[in-house]
Amino acid sequence: MNYMSNIARSEGDPKVIRTGPSSMDSTDRLARALGWFSIGLGAVELMAPGRITRALGMQGSEGLVQTYGLREIASGIMTLSTEKQTGLKSRLAGDGLDVATLLSAFRPDNPKNHNVALALVMVGGVTLLDYIGTLSTKVRHTRDRGQRRSYRDRTGFPKGIAAVRGIAKEFQGPPRTASRS
């Protein structure tokens, strides 16, 4: 049993006795993991841009790395929100920027080319995960635009219309008087 869910409840609220199965599937778990990864990577890029640029032989690009960190954090937050599809698409776009930036550092005069090559492989792997996440959330969370939901069978009355007929006649409120001033 999960007693943690009862901590923030008021005295009159019902208590959680047991929880049911989660509605999250592997697609949602992948999006969540990518969102947290993005926030963590962005925090590192914001706090330690010098270490990153030194490791890649890209000294002087610290401001760019910090800007990429802000982009990562924003994408991660969006991926963790209800707009996970947009967040994952922004992660894919960011991966493209990362690859382009790393390719510009992959030159014969860079003594850290092996680190750049390793970074390109890692970004490629994350890009693949972002692509898989984007496609799978699109399938799971996008409704077919051609089908419209029909609510013709719903009345808005939980017990049905027959249960509410005549209730207005039974109500005995104070008589209404018209006053003129």
Image: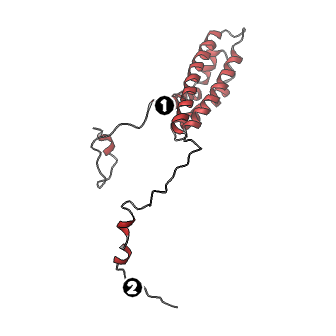
88 with respect to 32 (left or right): right
Relative to 125, residue 47 above or below: below
Relative to 68, residue 163 above or below: below
Image quarter in which the N terminus is found: top left
User: Where residue 165 sits in the image (x, y, percent)?
Assistant: 38, 71
Which amino acid type corresponds to the residue marked 2 in the rendered image? Pro
Q: State the CA–CA distance, disc 2 to disc 1.
A: 60 Å
**How many numbered dots are placed on residues in this image?**
2
139 with respect to 63 (left or right): left
User: Where residue 123 sits in the image (x, y, percent)?
Assistant: 59, 20
Which amino acid type corresponds to the residue marked 1 in the rendered image? Thr
The first of marks 2 and 1 along the sequence is: 1
Dot 1: within a 10 Å radius of its alpha carbon, few (fewer than 14), some, or many (20 or more) residues?
A: some
According to the image, label 1 marks what residue?
27
Residue at the (36%, 74%) spot, across then down:
166
Asked whether the residues under the numbered discs 2 and 1 touch, taking CB atoms below 8 Å apart as contact, a structural biologist would say: no
Element marked by disc 1: helix
Dot 2: within a 10 Å radius of its alpha carbon, few (fewer than 14), some, or many (20 or more) residues?
A: few
- The answer to whether residue 51 is seen in the rendering is no
Element marked by disc 2: loop
Is 28 in front, or is 165? 165
- The answer to whether residue 7 is seen in the rendering is yes
User: Where residue 38 sits in the image (x, y, percent)?
Assistant: 54, 29
Q: Which mark is residue 175?
A: 2
**Which quadrant of the figure has residue 86?**
top right
Relative to 27, residue 20 above or below: below
Is 106 in front, or is 157? 157
User: Where residue 161 sits in the image (x, y, percent)?
Assistant: 39, 65
Residue at the (38%, 59%) spot, across then down:
158
Residue at the (38%, 62%) spot, across then down:
160
Residue at the (36%, 61%) spot, across then down:
159
Q: Which mark is residue 128?
A: none
